[in-house]
Amino acid sequence: MELPPAALDAPTGDLGEMRVDRVAVAPLPAAPAGTVEGGIAVRVTNEAEVWHALVLGLRDYVDKNGFRSVVLGLSGGIDSSVVAAIAVDALGPHRVVGVSMPSQHSSGHSRDDAADLAKRTGLDYRVEAIQPMVDAFLANMSLSGLAVENLQARVRGVILMALSNQEGHLVLTTGNKSELAVGYSTLYGDSVGGFNPLKDVPKTLVWKLATWRNAEAERRGSEPPIPDSSITKPPSAELRPGQLDTDSLPDYAELDAILAGYVDGDKGRDELVAEGHDPAVVDRVLRLVDGAEYKRRQAAPGTKISIKAFGRDRRLPITNRWREPSSS
């Protein structure tokens, strides 16, 4: 406790005998005349509440940590499009840099969607083709299959971090909670970044947020920020020809339902199967979740919107051999 100056001269240290100066406080203002009509505000939709929370979380993190701007990879897909729209709402377009990093596998519509979103939002849009950089690696290393796919993601991560170092941006990563749960990301690639606005947002909710944000823009008479095709097209990492997320994962509606039970609800395998989920799919998803903890420990922080966000709320031991018992 810091004592007032009078205590320094008190011979016995008896604070009860000390003289304490008091500051006069002005009287409280009189209550307003008449009655004030109250009411109950109209409840906002879940999507509106989540969107505003994500905007606030990003703005606070950026401003309180002294960053002037943010940079993110803008692929034309739903996740990066939603992150870009959140960033523009939080910081303004002049503080957001979106970088398209096409490879030989990037579709024309993805490039067009990225450019369209940049035009709609007014953010700083740049294009950095990665294929020459990937080819330089492949000319010096013998890589194939998944290693080449991950190389593309890591080259993109290097570009974003280089721009961060050169220009002082905070890198935003764009992976959602569903991908984080099952490890559907590349370490030091698409997972690279200092903050992740979608860290606690399941994939199915990402689509709902995009639809809500566009509808809200139309309601206000402004242009929707997210191209419709970014919302409606099947999600793909576009790291190999014809790749779709469903090549590696269950349908997101089914995946998110299982993750909601296992991650948020702490339900075990038997409970999930009893709810009607396919036992083989449950076993596969739980195996992916338990095996991806080492990736989640290295993930960027993000805004919490659920009762059980990854991080302090839910952690598995990184090294353990226990698994949920399965029928196989």
Image (cartoon, helix red, strand yellow):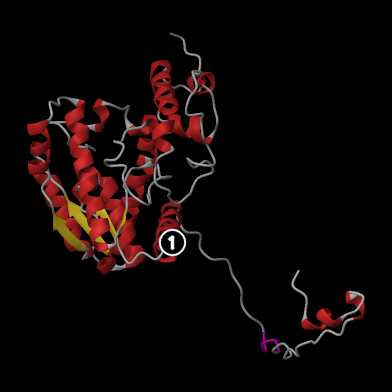
Residue 308 lies within the magenta run: no
When the figure is inspected, residue 169 is found, relative to residue 283, above or below; the finding is below
Q: Main secondary structure of the magenta part?
A: loop
Q: Secondary structure at mark 1?
A: helix
When the figure is inspected, residue 81 is found, relative to residue 94, above or below; the finding is above
When the figure is inspected, residue 40 is found, relative to residue 318, above or below; the finding is below
Task: Locate residue 120: give its quadrant.
Answer: bottom left
Amino acid type for the residue under numbered disc 1 = Leu
Magenta segment, which residues? 30-34
When the figure is inspected, residue 279 is found, relative to residue 306, above or below; the finding is above
Measured as percent of width and height from the top left, residue 62 is found at 39, 62
Measured as percent of width and height from the top left, residue 184 is found at 32, 33
Task: Locate residue 189: give its quadrant.
Answer: top left
Question: Residue at left 36%, top 32%?
Answer: 183
For residue 105, say whether it is visible: no
Taking the image as shown, residue 162 lies to the left or right of residue 9, namely left
Taking the image as shown, residue 202 lies to the left or right of residue 309, namely left
Residue 32 lies within the magenta run: yes
Q: On the image, numbered disc 1 is attached to which residue?
A: 56
